[in-house]
Amino acid sequence: MTTSQKLRTQAIEAAIESLDEAFFKALCEPSRVAVFKRVLLLGRADVGEIAKELPQERSVISRHLQVLHDAQIVKATKVGRQVFYEVNGGAIVERLEGLLQRTKGLVSLCCP
């Protein structure tokens, strides 16, 4: 395998790995996207507030929020017994910028 072929293969593998991250898996579920939209609209809210306009029960919303939190899409702050969620803008920008950089490298190697 030539150096060019190795670089191309590495770039493709990095791009595929990016798409397999928890970040994208968390956002591929329509219900979870709806939860994310609610958090975006509300700014900072607890599970009860987030669940008010959604068809799922609070326990389901809590699980969706946990997946979004694990993927660093939202951050959680505990105040007493309540947990407040808000969008983790910095982490989202960092992930998307990383994907953009890997994609730029991939385009020059495979699909100019």
Image (cartoon, rainbow, N blue to C red):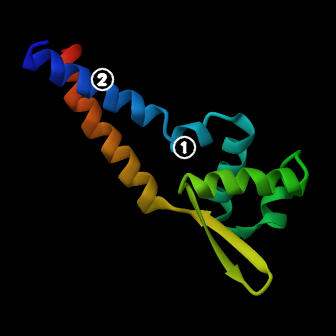
Residue type, numbered disc 2 = Ile
Q: Relative to residue 75, is residue 11 drawn left or right?
A: left
Indicate the position of residue 101 as horizontal and vertical percent values: 25, 39
Q: Secondary structure at mark 1?
A: helix
Q: Residue at x 79, y 64 (%)?
A: 47
* 72 with respect to 2 (left or right): right
Reading the image, the residue beneath label 2 is 12
Task: Please tell me which residue lies in front, 18 or 29.
Answer: 18
Q: How many marks?
A: 2
Marks 2 and 1, how far apart in space? 18 Å
Q: Quadrant of the N terminus?
A: top left
Name the secondary structure under disc 2.
helix
Farthest residue, direction front: 1
Say which amino acid is labelled 1: Ala
Q: Position of residue 80 (x, y in %)?
A: 76, 87
Q: Residue at x 24, y 27 (%)?
A: 10
Badge 1 is on which residue? 22
Residue drawn at (23%, 22%) of the image: 107
The percent coordinates of residue 33 (x first, y second) are: 66, 42
**Quadrant in which the C terminus is drawn:** top left
Q: Residues within 10 Å of mark 1 (few under 14, many from 20)?
A: some
Q: Residue at x 66, y 49 (%)?
A: 37
Residue 7 place in picture, x, y as percent: 16, 24
Q: Is 32 displayed left or right of 97 in the figure?
A: right
> As displayed, is residue 26 above or below residue 66?
above
